[in-house]
Amino acid sequence: MIPSPIRKALSTIRRHRVQALLMGGQACVLYGAAQFGRDLDLVILADPANYGRLRAALDELGAERIAVPDLQPEALARGHAVHFRCRASGVEGLRIDVMARLRGAAEFAELWDRRTTLESGGDSDLDVLSLPDLVAAKKTQRDPDWPTIAALVEIHHEEWRDDPTPDRVAFWLTETRSAERLINLAAAYPDQAAALIPARPLLASAISGDAETLRIELNAEVMAEQERDRIYWEPPKREMEAFSRAARATQAAP
């Protein structure tokens, strides 16, 4: 269930025709992989007209920027998030985080084409990052994200296991976090599992049924992905520190 302040904010954003996709905790709630999410996380189309529509929606929500950087295309294009706190009636205190680029995910046009739209009628419709794209976006250095990824993949498998298209099977084989499930999938789809070994070498252990080795490899896979995320965020982190120093200098100037 989406809390009413978040639903109101999303309705306002949609009414202003902003091309934006719900991601983060609230998207996980909608897919059934989390019980709650406090903030509203959006990935948006990096387009001047879309930025203008977003600014109009944020103004209506009384959204004030609460951290650097400002809502600038250049900062968003480099992967930064822009953070707002809403003040308008009905959305008081709601935090909105906006991004235009996600590590490991496709460009927005592809994300938009693959989106899930939950239809409630008009401005109440919700455009959500597809479940596979949400999994890609959740591969961060934060430990709590990985059980959520595992839950999302299991939910996808439960929903589509009776209709195992090649794309769905490939998603399960490349993203499943359970050794036992992965061994079963490799047994059910041996040719596809073998073909995917170059992309995910631990599938060789899944094919051989070596659960103990597979668990070790799955843990190593998480640690490697977390390190890639840490390295990715080093340059933006340094930029954030520079933004903060510049903002403090501006505030201190007479």
Image: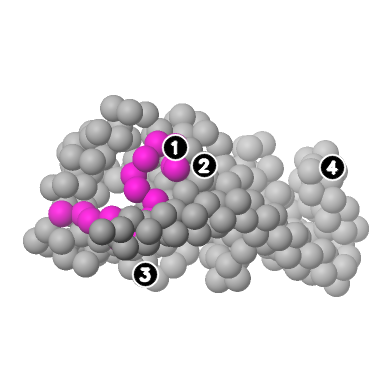
Image depth: mark 1 or mark 3 in front: 1
Cα–Cα span, label 3 and label 2: 29 Å
Callout 2 touching callout 1 (CB < 8 Å): yes
Q: Tell me which amino acid carries mark 3.
A: Phe
Q: Secondary structure at mark 4?
A: loop
- Quadrant in which the N terminus appears: bottom left
Mark 4 = which residue? 198
Q: Which x, y percent locates residue 36?
A: 36, 69
Callout 2 touching callout 4 (CB < 8 Å): no
Q: Earlier in the sequence, mark 1 or mark 3?
A: 3
Residue that appears at 46% across and 29% down? 109
- Say the numbered circle drawn on residue 78: 2
Q: Residues within 10 Å of mark 4 (few under 14, many from 20)?
A: few
> Which of these two is toward me, 53 or 195?
53
Q: Secondary structure at mark 3?
A: loop
Q: Which of the 4 image quadrants contains residue 143? A: bottom right
Cα–Cα span, label 4 and label 1: 36 Å
Q: Which residues are magenta?
A: 62-76
Q: Is residue 45 visible?
A: yes
Q: Tell me which amino acid carries mark 2.
A: Arg
Quick check: 236 above or below 93? above
Q: Earlier in the sequence, mark 4 or mark 1?
A: 1
> Which of these two is toward me, 179 or 60?
60
- Left or right of residue 99: residue 172: right
